[in-house]
Image: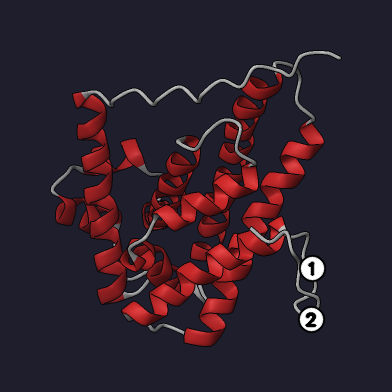
Amino acid sequence: MPASPARHPVPPPTAPSRRELNKAATRQSITEAALTLLRRKGLGNFTVEEIADAAGVSRRTFFNYFGSTEAAIASVTFGFLETALQQFRLRPAAEPILVSARAALVELADPMTVAPMAELYSLSQGSPQLVRSELEAWDHCTAEIIDAARERLALVTGGEVDELYLRALAGSIISCGKAAMDVWFARCGADLSADSLSALRQLLIKAMGLLGSGFTSPATPSTDRL
């Protein structure tokens, strides 16, 4: 009987350099300034120059990071998804991917962690430009999940990975995340209270559980739920 493939731990992430930290801080300042102006004035009622002034950077610096006001605003969603992805990458290599995805969301224990993304989701309703930017953020995360899952499975199997499996899995994870956001907004609207944000977090986790159980009907309890 052939020996089981070696199970290697996921290499720890390297610490960011000072330059990377400075770039991240500038990016965050621009994002926060854009979101503040969105709250105060509404989309289309402020300029790149106003965002740059509020963030304490030049117009040129703004465009070094973002191509438009919508892109700067949508980076809120990018930030949350990147944080979740970082948590996913820290999980054990041998752990099932869906278990890791759920654990990554659980790790974001503070409901306020999802507050900026939830607020942006609420503010983007009725704005095709912001919705498009939001979708781009989710698409980017799909690609990142594919890459992270490919790295992990290659470590575990030591061989090639089924691309159809990777892409179907990543697409399913992202679709479940979107579904959770839709249900949360339908129930809570623009409510950003701690209870509402806690409910959103639970919906995100439950959506991963549904995926892990094979979408067993709620009327037919499953014994293998995550």
Closest to the observer, 171 or 5: 5
Depth check, front residue: 47 or 6: 6
Residue 139 image point, x, y percent:
60, 48
Q: Is residue 192 visible?
A: no
Q: Are marks 2 and 1 in contact (CB under 8 Å)?
A: no
Residue 216: numbered disc: 1
Residue 162 lies, with reference to residue 28, above or below; the image says above
Please state the horizontal and vertical placement of residue 212, each as a whole percent of the image: 70, 56
Q: Secondary structure at mark 1?
A: loop
Kind of residue at badge 1: Thr
Query: Is residue 20 visible to the viewer in this orientation of the structure?
Result: yes
- Locate residue 110, reporting x and y percent: 33, 63
| Residue 206 located left or right of residue 44 | right
Picture disc at residue 71: none
3D distance between C-alphas at marks 2 and 1:
8 Å
Question: Which residue bears the numbered disc 2?
Answer: 219
Task: Say which quarter of the image contains residue 37.
Answer: bottom left
Image vertical order of residue 167 relative to residue 173, above or below: above
